[in-house]
Image (spheres, rainbow, N blue to C red):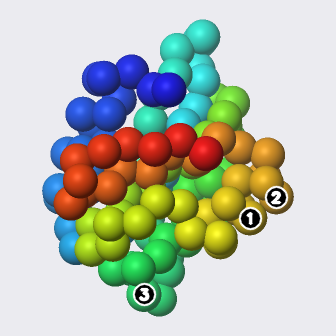
Amino acid sequence: MISDELKLKIKKESNKYSPQECCGLLIIKDSILDLFPCQNNAYDKINEFSINPKDYLKASQNGKIVGIYHSHCVQENSFSELDKQISHKLNLKNIVYIEKKNEFEEY
């Protein structure tokens, strides 16, 4: 699981964009895990996320991408089937922050 410091950063980002989902990537640079916030390109930003491809490219140039994170601001559910498919297809860990429950989950 990610550090409390990174969780706090995700919470702040989630609050900033709420009720829209925030999203980003987890990258390792110089042996340090950090966040790389991305623009949500989804049509329905309240119920889903889609990472901007240019942000994905920039993140890959800044470190090794090891995960995805996003928030659920309106929903109280865990990972959607699409979230799980994305994780499997990209072979990346997925972190979701469920704002209404103030909880993190990892897939």
Neighbor class of circle 3 (other Cα within 10 Å; few <14, some 14-19, many 20+) is few
Res 17 → quadrant: bottom left
Residue 59 is situated, as x and y percent measured from the top left of the image, at: 59, 43
Q: Is residue 46 above or below residue 102?
A: below
Disc 1 from disc 2: Cα separation = 6 Å
Find disc 2 in the rendering and name its residue.
89
Neighbor class of circle 2 (other Cα within 10 Å; few <14, some 14-19, many 20+) is few
Find disc 3 in the rendering and name its residue.
44
Frontmost residue, 53 versus 44: 44
Residue 40 is situated, as x and y percent measured from the top left of the image, at: 44, 69
Res 80 → quadrant: bottom right
Marks 1/3 in contact by CB < 8 Å: the verdict is no
Name the secondary structure under disc 3: loop
- Judge left or right: residue 53 versus residue 17: right
Residue 68, disc: none
Q: At 65% across and 41% down in the image, what residue appears?
A: 93
The quadrant the C terminus occupies is top right
Amino acid, disc 3: Asp
In the current view of this chain or complex, which residue is farthest to the bottom? 43
Disc 2 from disc 3: Cα separation = 22 Å
Amino acid, disc 2: Lys
Marks 1/2 in contact by CB < 8 Å: the verdict is yes
Residue 104 is situated, as x and y percent measured from the top left of the image, at: 38, 43
- Judge left or right: residue 67 versus residue 79: right
Q: Earlier in the sequence, mark 2 or mark 3?
A: 3
- Judge left or right: residue 69 versus residue 29: left
Q: At 65% across and 71% down in the image, what residue appears?
A: 82
Q: At 39% across and 21% down in the image, what residue appears?
A: 3
Find disc 1 in the rendering and name its residue.
85
Amino acid, disc 1: Gln
Q: Earlier in the sequence, mark 1 or mark 3?
A: 3
Between marks 1 and 3 in the image, the one whose residue lies nearer the viewer = 1
